[in-house]
Image: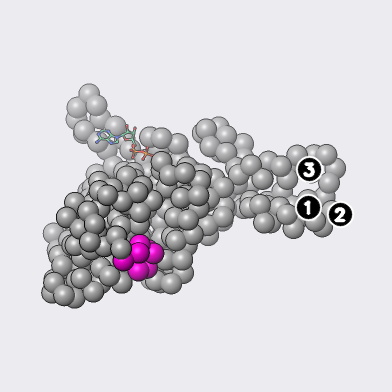
């Protein structure tokens, strides 16, 4: 069974007003358990609207969203339960932090799930260790942390609830390259070790190519492309038409091919490109 099944999903904002806007238009998609999926699309393509449907923050205008076999909009109980199954880390997760200490913040979710204070704190400690936030920060206010540490604290607050699906909206926005790489490495590790499905929204094609197994491209609220990074990035022209691009290294391979070198142009990461270039020597 798929973790997530979205059928004929449509979302219209401000229905019946002059500001009416179709943000999601007939999206059908299934995400099996354990997949690491990247979601891309230019600003306004519907990414944020889409992910908010996956944990019932928004209700579909029409269509259904099924999580773990259950229609999450069927009743109020389903909507509440789905928040524990599908954890959402917002774009600037620092706004998700509100308790007086990092530890209490991470314990907030499990406590809401009905665990005792001590159990919730234990789950919080485990989650903080998983995100590699050292113990010396646990009694500090979340607001005293650096940008990267705040992201880790926000992720800990979500994984402390042991979700089946983890959704991260541009988790590295505003971080420097080192902080970005460290956070992506952490997300990969969480995906591998916690048996979670991960859906990651990112603008960086390089990061998508490096980390995810499947890329879904949205355009004007519709599903434009869906496949492995190599499959999706082979549609360079279509991506460029919607102001997206393939990773730099894919362009390099195409240039090499044009110059007469027999290289694989479906390459999307630097590691793969290195192997192709060494083969030429
Ligand atoms: P993305 O996350 O890809 O930038 P969004 O899901 O935020 O896209 O937006 C999709 C479309 O819906 C855009 O045209 C946006 O202007 C519109 N939209 C988003 N939120 C609202 C809202 N609360 N009210 C009206 N229109 C909205």
Q: How is the protein colored in the picture?
A: one colour
Say which residue label 3 marks: 256
Quadrant where the N terminus sits is bottom left
Q: At 52% across and 33% down in the image, what residue appears?
A: 243
Q: How far apart are the alpha carbons under marks 1 and 3? A: 9 Å
In the picture, the disc for residue 106 is none
Relative to 154, 44 lies left or right: right
Q: Residues within 10 Å of mark 2 (few under 14, many from 20)?
A: few
Report the magenta residues as a range. Answer: 128-135
Q: At 21% across and 33% down in the image, what residue appears?
A: 14
Badge nearest the viewer, 2 or 3? 2
Say which residue label 2 marks: 281
- Element type where label 1 sits in the image: helix
Q: At 47% across and 49% down in the image, what residue appears?
A: 180
Say which residue label 1 marks: 277
Q: Are marks 2 and 1 in contact (CB under 8 Å)?
A: yes
Residue 264 pos. (x, y %) = 74, 52
Query: On the image, which quarter does residue 92 sit in?
Result: top left
Q: How far apart are the alpha carbons under marks 2 and 1? A: 7 Å
Ligand 1: give its quadrant: top left
Residue 90 pos. (x, y %) = 31, 48
Residue 78 pos. (x, y %) = 19, 63
Residue at the limit of the structure toward the top, as seen here: 18
Say above or below: 107 vs 22. below
Badge nearest the viewer, 1 or 3? 1
Q: Is residue 235 visible?
A: no
Q: At 71% across and 52% down in the image, what residue appears?
A: 273
Q: Are marks 1 and 3 in contact (CB under 8 Å)?
A: yes
Relative to 77, 43 lies left or right: right
Say above or below: 114 vs 88. below
Q: Residues within 10 Å of mark 1 (few under 14, many from 20)?
A: some
Q: Earlier in the sequence, mark 1 or mark 3?
A: 3
């Amino acid at each position: 069974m798929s973790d997530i099944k979205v059928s004929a999903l449509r979302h219209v904002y401000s229905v019946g007003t002059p500001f009416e806007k179709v943000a999601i238009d007939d999206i059908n998609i299934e995400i099996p358990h354990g997949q690491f999926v990247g979601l891309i699309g230019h600003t306004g393509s519907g990414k944020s609207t889409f992910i908010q449907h996956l944990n019932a923050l928004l209700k579909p205008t029409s269509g259904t969203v099924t999580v773990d076999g259950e229609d999450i909009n069927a009743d109020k109980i389903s909507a509440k339960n789905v928040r524990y199954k599908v954890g959402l880390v917002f774009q600037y997760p620092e706004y998700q932090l509100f308790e007086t200490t990092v530890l209490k913040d991470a314990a907030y979710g499990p406590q809401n799930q009905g665990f005792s204070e001590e159990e919730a704190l234990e789950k919080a400690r485990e989650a903080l260790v998983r995100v590699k936030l050292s113990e010396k920060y646990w009694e500090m206010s979340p607001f005293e942390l650096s940008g990267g540490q705040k992201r880790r604290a926000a992720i800990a607050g979500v994984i402390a609830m042991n979700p089946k699906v983890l959704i991260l909206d541009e988790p590295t926005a505003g971080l420097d390259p080192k902080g970005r790489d460290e956070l992506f490495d952490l997300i990969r590790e969480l995906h591998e070790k916690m048996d979670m499905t991960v859906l990651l929204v990112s603008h960086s094609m390089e990061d998508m190519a490096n980390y995810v197994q499947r890329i879904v491209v949205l355009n004007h609220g519709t599903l434009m492309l869906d496949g492995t990074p190599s499959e999706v990035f082979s549609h360079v022209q279509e991506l460029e038409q919607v102001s997206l691009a393939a990773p730099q290294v894919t362009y390099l391979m195409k240039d090499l091919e044009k110059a007469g070198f027999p290289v694989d142009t479906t390459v999307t990461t630097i590691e793969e490109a290195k192997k192709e270039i060494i083969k030429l020597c």
